[in-house]
Amino acid sequence: MELREGLLYSKSHEWVKEEGEEVLIGLTDYAQSELGDLVFVNLPEEGDEVTTGESFADVESVKAVSDVYSPVTGVVSAVNEELLDAPESINEAPYDAWFVRVKDISDREELLTAAEYEAFVESEKDA
């Protein structure tokens, strides 16, 4: 499982990269490996509102369809439309394959450091 320092992680397996007043959100390496080969991505529109803890996108793998949850509340300022044509890029480089950029952030869930997320994933495996 690859983790990157400088990113924050949610317990629903999304990563967050803070860039000034905005954040990028994507799926962690652990999440994409558990999901298997991704074949389809459904993304929100620019201008859509996202809410902490609620689904804002979904991904379809050869196994199942899974929701992607927002670790922040805010407004989508950009969508990575490249994922629509190349969902496999999430499997190939999960920390480069961001889903959305979010601005006007008013709430965020408690995010984990890389070390905290790694410990959380290990505790989930043991459960």
Image: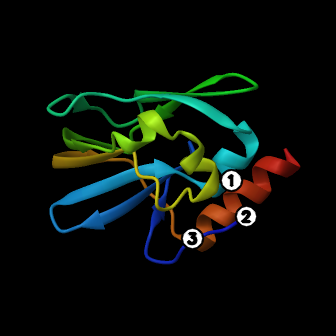
Residue 49 image position (x, y, % from top left): 20, 30
Instruction: Nearest to the eye among marks 3 and 1: give it.
Output: 1
Q: Residue at x 46, y 53 (%)?
A: 97
First in sequence: mark 3 vs mark 2: 2
Q: Position of residue 100 (x, y in %)?
A: 32, 44
- Dot 2, how many residues are within 10 Å of its Cα: few (below 14), some (14-19), or many (20+)? few
Q: Which residue bears the numbered disc 3?
A: 114
Distance of mark 3 from mark 1, alpha carbons?
Answer: 12 Å
Q: Which residue is mark 2?
A: 1
Q: Secondary structure at mark 2?
A: loop
Find the residue positioned furthest to the front: 85
Q: Residues within 10 Å of mark 1 (few under 14, many from 20)?
A: some
Callout 3: helix, strand or loop?
helix
Q: Of all residues shown, which one is farthest toward the bottom?
A: 5
Q: In the picture, residue 122 is in which quadrant?
A: bottom right
Residue closest to the far top:
65
Vertical comparison of 48 with 83: above or below: above
